[in-house]
Image (spheres, coloured by chain):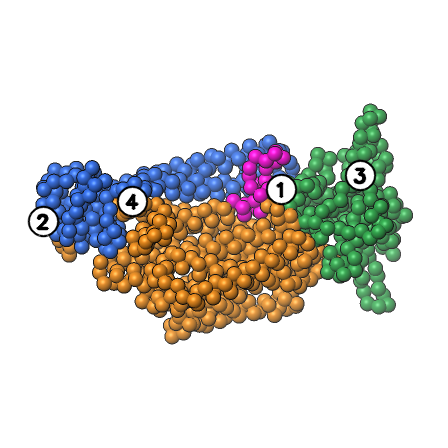
Amino acid sequence: MTAMYGLFDKPDEAQRAYTGLKRAGIAPREIAVVSGEPFEAFEFSHRDHSMILFRLALLGGILGFLSAVALVRGTELAWPLVTAGMPIVAWWPNLVIIFEMTMLGAIVTTVVSLLVTAKLPRFKKSLYDPAVSEGKILVGVPAASDTIRDALTSNGASVVKTVEL
Amino acid sequence: MSEYAVQLTDDLLRPLLKTSWRFWTLVVLLLGVVALGLGAFAYQVDRGIGVWGLNWPVFWAFDITNFVFWIGISHAGTLISAILRLVNAEWRRPVTRCAEVITVFALIIGAMFPIVHLGRPWLFFWLMPYPSERQIWPNFRSPLVWDFFAISTYLTGSSLFLYLPTIPDFALVRDKTTGLRRRIYGILALGWTGTTKQWHRLESAMQIMAIAIVPVAVSVHTIVSFDFSMAPVPMWHSTVFGPYFVAGAIFSGIAALIIAMASLRKFLHLEKYLHPVHFENLGKLLLMMSLLWGYFVFAERLTTWYGNQGSEMTVFWQTQRLSFAPLYWTMVTVNFIIPVMILSFKRLRTITGCVVASFGVVLGMWLERFLIIVPALSHKYLPYSWGHYRPRAPEILLLIATFGAMVLFYVLFSKVVPIISIWEMKIGQHPQLAHEHETADQKAAMWRTHP
Amino acid sequence: MAVDLDTCTGCEACVVACHAENNIATAGPEEAARGRAMHWLRVERYWEGEFPDVKLKFRPVLCQQCDAAPCESVCPTYASHHTDEGLNAQVYNRCIGTRYCANACPYNVRFFNFFNPQWDKPLHLQFNPDVSIREVGVMEKCTFCVQRIKAAEVNADAEKRELKDGELKPACAQTCPATAIVFGDLNDPDSKVSQLWASGRGEKLLEDVGALPKIAYLKRAEA
């Protein structure tokens, strides 16, 4: 499909373009804002805010906890060898293993969730311009029309391009 | 891009894009040192641990000293990177990646020693919990198995903690290179573009990782200290070991970080980004940790002395007055007296001052681990079984090789990855734009300056 | 086990018997000087007093087969564990040589194969076929001659009877010319060792450490 984007020098220009595109009837979900650093203070960043990673990390921790309990209890009961007069299922030492596996569960889940929700790795062509690495901010839409071009240029786009994705 | 950002990118990508003969010379030299260590290890696997200086009753010495030492050094990244991120300390920006790199590589080196010190190292995988054909699992009551879990978790966590913020920088390098380099960095960047969703998710993930990695780091060195405190050896079976070791680890980690940063600043010409104030701040932290270390040593020794138990006092006097006294008092001098003297005075808390203090601390912390292990093992309960220990060439070569390996890893890393986080430095120029504002007033204020 | 410190003469015949029975190599003078000698059973000697009023005390020290053995909980591979019969077992095949057990042992009765053991000819013809040879990197220690215990139990089973007290002796007990070492079943109140334990002369070595050792050292009568 054809996509159109503009490159901006400053984040407030990008914000104005974003607002302009919204007024022109484009759905916020369709407007991509791509930058070389995060600009959380601006409204265009807010639509993606969600606590999903935190919730998934908690879930990952719980899964880690449960697998650890199963591992230590299961294996200690499978081979009931007495050591140092300690009980076969010795909970105090087991707590150490349980703690570590809980944290590992949370950590690994966080990273996996990051990759999945941010759709990484992503190697197919997406709305991007190497000028972003030079500090420009890209605001683009997977559609092309004069309204879009106007919304971009009137808000300070230094250049507007059309690409095939 | 602002002028600052242009200069920043140039300076931080220069090591990646330009290589001099000095780099290659250094790498070859370091590879030689590491090869010597590998050769010593191969010799030991072939002939037996007998080629070391270990004996009855001193069954651990340099091997476990090195292990605890390097795991301790690995606590640099956590404190600086995670805690400073959590409290939003702006001065952390040029320092976080340097610190995280130390953590990952020190962990890798430290984690080699549980394998290297084994009598039958080819069977090290029996420490892993897997369904084996022998149908037996590890003994989860053993602190060594706790070590395996803790270090694996910490290594996984730290590596990911290091990797995640490099993704945007890999994307930057991808865009500035061509050919094979571009492809490799492209893969490492995972196709990152920088959409608002990607940024938000990345920063959420970093936040969670920072929160999670701190308790893991505390637990790792506590568990390493449990290798000692869980055994009824005089002066090992101490309840203070957990916090004592964690404090000591953070102490040695900050010292290693100061040395690494000073070296990077000098050899990569990063004077614009690593300012004297960064070293001053780290120097203040080092001072605080030195005082904390001194506090723990004093508390432990005073308690032992008041307890006046026969076997404990034997070990106590060995370090305080007898055969280990020279090493002990050297340790106290370089860990406490000299750092406190240098770092307490602003005029002395220069980059050079901090580096001098740090070298002393690195030496002192290695000595501390050695002095915990060997005097106690050589003087346990039955005097007939007391012994002594002298290191032999293979152990010394291994020790030197670990330092060579650390420097080698660091040099290679800074050759392929920007050693300071470029995107985070860019944010540092205008942090108020990067963070969501809480109150409507703050938002309004921000809109006023950036209409 | 009970060891009578009054009758023990410190002759160390038990040490030699242990080496012979359990295929323990000698380390040689160089390695012994480096502290690599492996005497599963050793006689510790302590001198008291100044010349000419010197007194000599000695005590055979061997694995105490502790009920709360600190060596067992620290072994990552269960190579050191407690059997149903109350022995501390050392499973050579599971040992990966971390040497943690040796550090944890308060009695220093655990030994490590720093090298592959060597026997000068013709000692290589004198191995006990019931005891495996340990390879480099593995821990070993006194087993109360578990091979003899197992052999006697198998015989008793085949004859469909219980083991008799005194029927089996570890090599040290068998060899001691002063019969200072007494081995038996502590669960049997009529066995000789149980009676010695109940005699009131018995003391444990390093009792305060709390490892619950199972050797009672019978006090010397004061001269």
- Look at the numbered disc 3 and give the secondary structure of its residue: loop
Q: Dot 4: what SS?
A: helix
- Residue stretch rendered in magenta on the structure: B125-149
Chain letter of the residue carrying label 1: C
The furthest residue to the bottom? B347
Q: In the rendering, at what x and y percent does residue B373 appear?
A: 61, 58
- Which residue is the site of mark 2? A154
Residue A91 visible, this orientation = yes
Foreground: disc 1 or disc 4: 4
- The residue at which mark 3 appears reads as C130
Chain C display color:
green
Distance from label 1 to label 2 (Cα)?
A: 72 Å
Q: Chain of mark 2?
A: A
Q: Quadrant of the N terminus of chain B?
A: bottom left
Q: Closest to the observer: B84 or A131? A: A131
Residue C77: numbered disc: 1
Residue C197 in percent (x, y) is at 79, 42
Q: Is residue B412 above or below residue A116?
A: below
Whole-angstrom CA distance, mark 4 to mark 3, is 68 Å
Marks 1 and 3 close (CB-CB < 8 Å):
no
Query: Which of labels 4 and 2 is toward the front?
Result: 2
| Amino acid type assigned to the residue bearing label 3 in the image | Asp
Instruction: Please name the color used to draw chain A.
Output: blue
Q: Which amino acid type corresponds to the residue marked 4 in the rendered image?
A: Gln
Q: Amino acid at mark 1?
A: Thr
